[in-house]
Image (cartoon, rainbow, N blue to C red):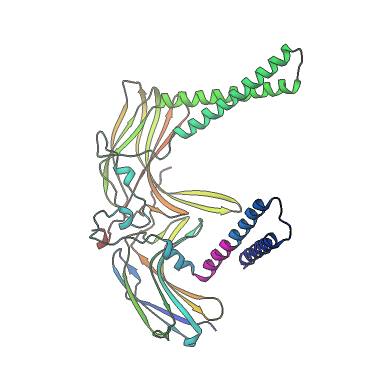
Amino acid sequence: MGEFTFFVLVLLLGLISLGFLLFAPEKSPDFWLMLLIVGSLLSIGGGGLLLAYFHYSISRERRRAITQKRPALDLLKENVRSTDRFPSIPSDANIIDSPGTRLRYRLPRFESAFWPMLAASLFALSWLAVSVTLLVTVVNRILDEQTYWLFTAMLLASIVVTHWAIRYCYRQLRFITRVGTTMVEISHHPLLPGSTCEGFLLQSGSMKLRLLSLTLVCEEQVTYRQGTDLRIESYPAFKQKIAVLKNNDLRSDRVLEHDFEFSIPESAMHSFRGEHNQVQWKLVVRGKPESLPRFTRSFLIIVHPRNPGREAG
Amino acid sequence: MEPLVSIMLCDPHRHYRPGQRMRCSYQVDAIAADAIQAVEASIMWLSSGKGDEEMGIHEFHRRTRDDQNTDLRMLHQFDTSLPNSPLSFEGTILKIHWVVRVKIFLKEGQPYSRDLSFQLGSVAGFREQLP
């Protein structure tokens, strides 16, 4: 009800201001600016009032039924997407569009190394620019026989930050080039509870790999609001080690290849994705190289329910 | 006084397979016919647990009081094919429940709703953790 009152007040303020603006004996020099403000008040008040009306007069279920995409159950439809036949299960379109070199599908990586690397590079470059600008300013002042201690102190601080950022960026770059690519391929998709799937793991790079493990993980993941913060929490509902590979020396001409097989448990929950909650299945590769930080790479897989009804075909 | 809503499903065990046909009927009692403005019936899933709650509507019916439909209290029946997913799930921080919800909009006062839960599919709790 508070929301309703607020928008009524905003609308009233807009209407009163409009009357004052139109019928005032003297035209204000900022007429158009005032009109813009009044227009904003009217649209915020009116729009908000309309939304509040819909919010209160239509039940949550009805709103949801209107806005929600209904599952298409039409068997005559030519292209029935997996999300139509299996509501709330993520689409496997980006999994089946990459053919593998040995097995049928190459799984896409869950997280990309590109954006963190780009962010680190931009951070380092920005600080380098700040340092160079400060350096030129300080040198000019010194040549003019003036010394600004504040600028000099800022230059020293900026050199420290720049040094750290460039070192971090270099280490990231070295890590990316030395660790190389992790590739996971599977024989079929989507997977079903109780089914067994063949897989192929390839790890390239230039490093001594002390340990490389491959795990099948099913994770419950939820997001919730706590005050103004949005929090994400995960719980590993299922975890099964598929392979543990020890002491491998990787070079440009020698990659690590491993064939494996894994099964989805008979009683497993299928993949699920809502707005705030999800159940996700993934193959997780964890590496422990010598003289380099550990790394984790995840590959999403989609698990469908075992006995779909007749809509599934 | 609150209205009395009874919801009945065709399977007394309330356990359905994905894609199975479900027949549902409901009836309203202990309230005057002209006190009801509209009745909504939904077959829906609800999430609960640690995350923000959400819902998904599979089937939605709304009946309003008009010249042809003067008494919304009468036994009303509808049927639907249940979807393939999401299946009922009892996780640790996430749970998915299926319900039939009947919501009554009264001429005066707050709407009144009643849920009847049922099970879709059979996903048992599963766990196989390594240290």
Q: Is residue A209 visible?
A: yes
Q: Position of residue B11 (x, y in %)?
A: 32, 74
Q: Nearer the viewer, residue B90 or A42?
A: A42
Q: Nearer the viewer, residue A57 or A201?
A: A57
* Residue at the image point whose x is 61% and y is 53% from the top: A227
Q: Nearer the viewer, residue A108 or B51?
A: A108
Q: Decide: is A259 above or below A171.
A: below
Q: Position of residue A273 (x, y in %)?
A: 41, 53
Residue A51 belongs to the span the image colors magenta = yes
The stretch of residues the image draws in magenta is A46-58
Q: Position of residue A118 (x, y in %)?
A: 49, 31
Quadrant of image for the C terminus of chain A? bottom left
Quadrant of image for the N terminus of chain A? bottom right
Q: Quadrant of residue A248?
A: top left
Residue A125 belongs to the span the image colors magenta = no
Give the prevailing secondary structure in the magenta stretch: helix
Q: Is residue A309 left or right of residue B102?
A: left
* Residue at the image point whose x is 41% and y is 24% from the top: A178
